Amino acid sequence: MNKKANLLHQILVQLILIALIFGLFYLSTMAKANSRVVKQQVLEKEIALLIDSAEPETNLYIYKLNINGYINKIILKNSSVSVYVDEYSLSKGYPFFTRYNVSISEDQDKFIIYIK
Amino acid sequence: MNKKAAIGESIQMVYRLVIVLIIAVVIMGNSALVYDFYINTRNSEAKILTQSILDCIVKDSKIDIDGFSNSFNYKNKVLEYCGIKNLDRFYVKLSFFSGNNNILILEQGDSGKLWTKTILENQKGSILKYTPGYYKSNYVYTGIYNGQEARISIEVEVLINEETK
């Protein structure tokens, strides 16, 4: 009985340790997948594609609080769009090529991109 | 259980844990590579650029080939003519056909960039994130050619290289 109990105890300890190790790696992988850099890349490319495909006299509304996090700032400069998500302050920006004039304004809860 | 057996089992447990750790590190390494997350939107950009250029050169669903041939100063600057920005990334070629005759070619950009596409097509791994966007398609419009209305087909080829910034 004592031997069986010992074996069970050892297996249990091993299983807990294995679960802990995999749990840690799973969490770190998830953290990387959901990182601000990824969210920023998604937002910049989505916005660039929207601008490129938009017809003149189109307004694009981008809410500050959205599925990809909280957008602090969007800058349109030298025909590229930079999005700053969750207080991440670095951005290379993503270029767009639209042949129309593009400008941006900030509202309380959203950014508005004007294509004219 | 005697003492030797207990020590033996403890060593075995450490051994198992080391194996688990190695497996976990391998999984972590692979997932880190997979989540070197890069979204390549260049193929979509190539399609959008194609539509944008067609919107620019086709007026009221018609193309004035005579107008292009006589007064068009943009044969090698079709993107500039259309007011497209960030030109460095693009190669665009529009071939106009009346029947089987190639009547006009408008293009802009470095056609050598097509080599990048050919080279990267046969590669594997993370280098693929540099694969250019590419779109080639044919369109048919009514147009004015030699003073007469004619069916004009356009072959559009667009290549978009990686962003340089």
Image: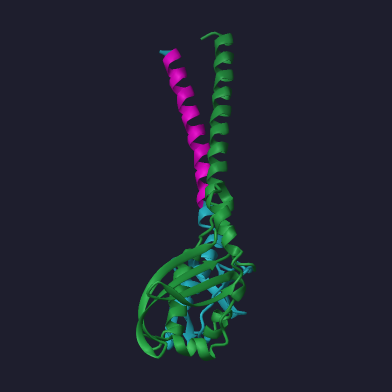
Residue B94 in sight in this render:
yes
Q: Is residue A32 left or right of residue A2?
A: right
Compare residues B127 and B23 and report the one nearer the observer.
B127
A27 to B39, vertically: above or below: above
- At horizontal 57% and vertical 14% (from top left) the residue drawn is B8
- At horizontal 56% and vertical 47% (from top left) the residue drawn is B125
Viewport quadrant of the C terminus of chain B? bottom right
Q: Position of residue A70 (x, y in %)?
A: 50, 70
Compare residues A13 and A82 and report the one nearer the observer.
A82
Q: Where is residue B135 in the image (x, y as percent from the top left)?
A: 46, 66
Residue A63 in sight in this render:
no
Q: Is residue A53 left or right of residue A83?
A: left
Start and end of the magenta stretch?
A: A3-30
- At horizontal 59% and vertical 52% (from top left) the residue drawn is B127
- Secondary structure that dominates the magenta span: helix
- Chain in cyan on the image: A
Compare residues B56 and A86 and report the one nearer the observer.
B56
- At horizontal 45% and vertical 85% (from top left) the residue drawn is B65
Compare residues B13 and B87 and report the one nearer the observer.
B87
A59 to B159, vertically: above or below: below
Q: Position of residue A37 (x, y in %)?
A: 57, 61
> In the rendered picture, chain B carries what hue?
green
